[in-house]
């Protein structure tokens, strides 16, 4: 075989090898990112301690804190009105906070919160403030 032809074959084989290695590396990085995201979500869920509130009792002025990473969300029971437990929820973020007013029917009873975002009672809530002290991006 002539030397230039051998060099072309060797070059082509090297390019194929580099392509295979790059492809394999990309798949490894993608798989690692997917696993990292799953572990991160599981870690957050496992770090949140479930809390239960009995809305049928509606203990006035009771405040329950829900740690949420570097912030704390709060649920404050304000009292009973027309068969509903009046509640204010506060969501903190790095740039401020916002609140919701909630009217939870007393017959809702015991609710266990499995995350700090009050999803279990969101259907009974309305936005009270759209954000106090939140950083606004333009």
Image (cartoon, rainbow, N blue to C red):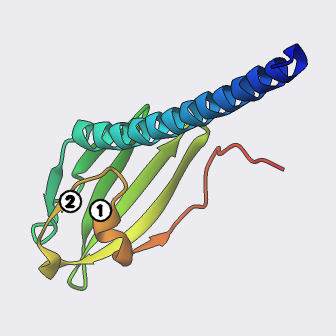
Q: Can you give x and y, in whole percent of width and height, for residue 122 in the image?
A: 37, 70
Report helix, strand or loop for mark 1.
Answer: strand
Residue 27 marker? none
**Residue 108, how many percent across, how many down?**
16, 77
137 displayed left or right of 36: right
**Looking at the image, is 108 positioned above or below residue 8?**
below
**1 or 49: nearer the eye?**
1
Nearer the observer, 83 or 96:
96
Residue at the far top in the pictured view: 3
In-image side of 112 versus 24 (left or right): left
* Residue topped by disc 2: 60
- Is 92 left, or right, of 118 in this rendering? right
In which quadrant of the rendered view does residue 57 lie? bottom left
* Crowding at mark 1 (Cα within 10 Å: few <14, some 14-19, many 20+): some
Whole-number angstrom distance, CA of label 1 to CA of label 2: 5 Å
Q: Answer with the quarter of the image where residue 118 lies.
A: bottom left
Residue for point 35% across, 77% down: 124
Labels 1 & 2 near each other (Cβ < 8 A): yes
The image position of residue 128, as x and y in percent, is 52, 66
Task: Looking at the picture, tell me which residue is in the foreground, 115 or 52.
Answer: 115
Instruction: Report the residue that reaches farthest toward the bottom.
Output: 82
Which residue is at a point 86% across and 18% down the rendered structure image? 2
Nearer to us in this view, 13 or 108: 13
Q: Position of residue 46 (x, y in %)?
A: 23, 40
Which residue shows up at 54% across the image and 34% down it?
24
Residue that sits furthest to the front in the current view: 1
- Give the residue at x 38% y 57%: 89
Q: Residues within 10 Å of mark 2 (few under 14, many from 20)?
A: some
Mark 2 element type: loop
> Which quadrant does the N terminus fall into?
top right
Q: Is residue 87 above or below residue 69?
A: below
Q: Which residue is mark 1?
A: 78
């Amino acid at each position: 075989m002539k030397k230039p032809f051998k060099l072309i074959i060797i070059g082509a084989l090297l390019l194929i090898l580099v392509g295979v290695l790059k492809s394999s590396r990309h798949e490894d990085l993608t798989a690692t990112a997917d696993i990292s995201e799953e572990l991160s979500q599981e870690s957050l869920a496992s770090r949140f301690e479930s809390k239960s509130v009995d809305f049928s009792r509606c203990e006035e002025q009771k405040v329950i804190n829900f740690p949420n990473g570097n912030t704390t969300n709060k649920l404050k029971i304000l009292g009973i009105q027309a068969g509903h437990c009046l509640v204010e929820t506060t969501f903190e973020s790095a740039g401020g906070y916002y609140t919701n007013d909630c009217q939870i029917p007393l017959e809702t009873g015991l609710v266990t919160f499995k995350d700090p975002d009050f999803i279990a009672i969101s259907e009974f809530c309305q936005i009270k403030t759209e954000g106090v002290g939140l950083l606004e991006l333009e």
